[in-house]
Image (cartoon, rainbow, N blue to C red):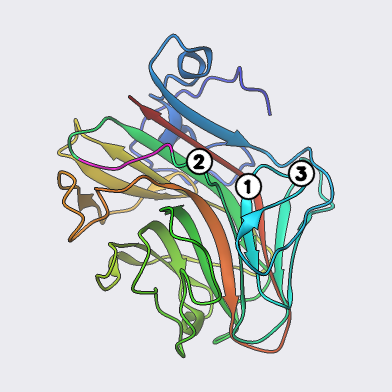
Amino acid sequence: MSNSVQYKGSQTGGLSDTSRGPSPSIWADCPWENLRSGHTDGVTIWDDFDTGGLITSPTTEAALVGIPYSGFGSSGATITHGDQAGGTVVLTEATDNEAVYLKSESHPFQISSHLKKLWFEGRVKVNAITDNQIGFLFGLFDTTALTVIIPLSTANPPIFATTGNFVGFRGPEEDAGGVDSTYVADGVTEVVVGALVHQFVADTYVKLGMVFDPLDGNKLSFFVNGVKMADTKVIPNATGTDFPADVRLAPIVGHRLGASTSSLTTLDWWRGAQLI
């Protein structure tokens, strides 16, 4: 996709946008070109996974060969490029109660009431929506090292570990493809902002996104296929007790397997920006 595209529209998010591209309702007011060129102060990430080499899948979190990210994979995990027009990365886990994750080790984002606007979105799919088969997550995570129990624990069903901070979307293993908007502050029980904001269809892409807007009452809003969800979170100022406003964050995607059937999470692209 060309970085020269400008997104026009509003953030009312009234119409579902299932196209491959970023959702106009999220990106309409993002000064993307100015951020990329340095004319506006801020940071951007943009990866369509359309280039890269053979990807390693380490059993301890480490930098991946082939793409500029870190990863973790249990003994039954692989991280590969997908055979799809436009490029994808595919995370596979084949062993029950083990996990596979991909994340950035550069943490350019922070969501706090004293900071500026943030936009984030990605296009993902899972191949399984059976109860107790796959526990999915996608969003922003802190610098905590990925392990077999972090960020999702080995509890049955899995819950977030007591270490690590996360903001984004989670598909609980026990909910047959249901996805919640959610967050976790280090050591604090997961808070579900919006329950069942999306229902996965097996092997069908969805675009999941977030916008933090300090000029809109410090609200963090969640989007599904460009549609703004009703439930929002008012963000505090770097407290870290109710919301992870005190930590730096980076993109993460992955899942924990809850059955003996090998399962896949496919990421088509992810994109983020924040004013500084």
In this view, 246 is above or below 72: above
Mark 1 or mark 2: whose residue is earlier in sequence: 1
Nearest-to-viewer mark from 2 and 3: 2
Question: Which residues make up the magenta segment?
Answer: 108-112
The residue positioned 44% from the left and 27% from the top of the image is 43
Label 2 secondary element:
loop
Callout count:
3
Cβ–Cβ under 8 Å for marks 2 and 3: no
* Cα gap from disc 2 to disc 3, whole angstroms: 22 Å
Q: Which residue is mark 1?
A: 69
* Cα gap from disc 1 to disc 2, whole angstroms: 9 Å
Density class for disc 2 (Cα within 10 Å; few <14, some 14-19, many ≥20) is some
Q: Nearer the viewer, residue 268 or 37?
A: 37
Q: Which mark is residue 214?
A: none
Q: Which residue is mark 2?
A: 106
Question: The residue under label 2 is which amino acid type?
Answer: Ser
Question: The residue under label 1 is which amino acid type?
Answer: Tyr
Q: Which residue is mark 3?
A: 87
Q: Nearer the viewer, residue 228 or 241?
A: 241
* Cα gap from disc 3 to disc 1, whole angstroms: 16 Å
